Amino acid sequence: MSIETFPTFTAPAREFWSAIPEEARKRIIANVWCGKCGGSTTITNFSGTIRRGDLLLVGKCAVCHKDVARLVEGT
């Protein structure tokens, strides 16, 4: 999935994500913890929502395909 597409982002999540510089978005996607793998991975097939002012990305581990999530804190 391209980081430029938002097939399952809510409108507020899309706005939040779009405000993040592209290089930072790439680093966020590539730095997600996977409990099964026990380390950092890349999130794939992710969606985004806003929770309490923060962006929550939910998707799959690029290595083992288990569920992973990444929280990006709002200001």
Image (cartoon, rainbow, N blue to C red):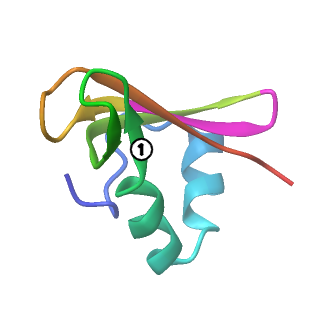
Image position of 53 with respect to 4: above or below: above
- Say left or right for 8 vs 19: left
- Seen as rendered, the residue at the extreme front is 38
Stretch in magenta = 52-58
Residue ID at (56%, 56%) = 17
Tell me the kind of residue under disc 1.
Val
Q: State the predominant SS element of the stretch in magenta.
A: strand
* Quadrant into which the C terminus falls: bottom right
Q: Is residue 1 above or below residue 13?
A: below
Residue hosting label 1: 32
Q: Position of residue 35 (x, y in %)?
A: 36, 23
Q: Position of residue 42 (x, y in %)?
A: 28, 49
Residue at 34% from the left image edge and 64% from the top image edge:
4
Question: Is residue 57 found inside the magenta-colored segment of the image?
Answer: yes
Q: Which residue is found at the position 73% from the left and 39% from the top?
A: 54
Measuring from the top left, give residue 7's x and y in whole percent: 31, 40
Q: Is residue 27 left or right of residue 41?
A: right
Which residue appears farthest toward the left when viewing the image? 64
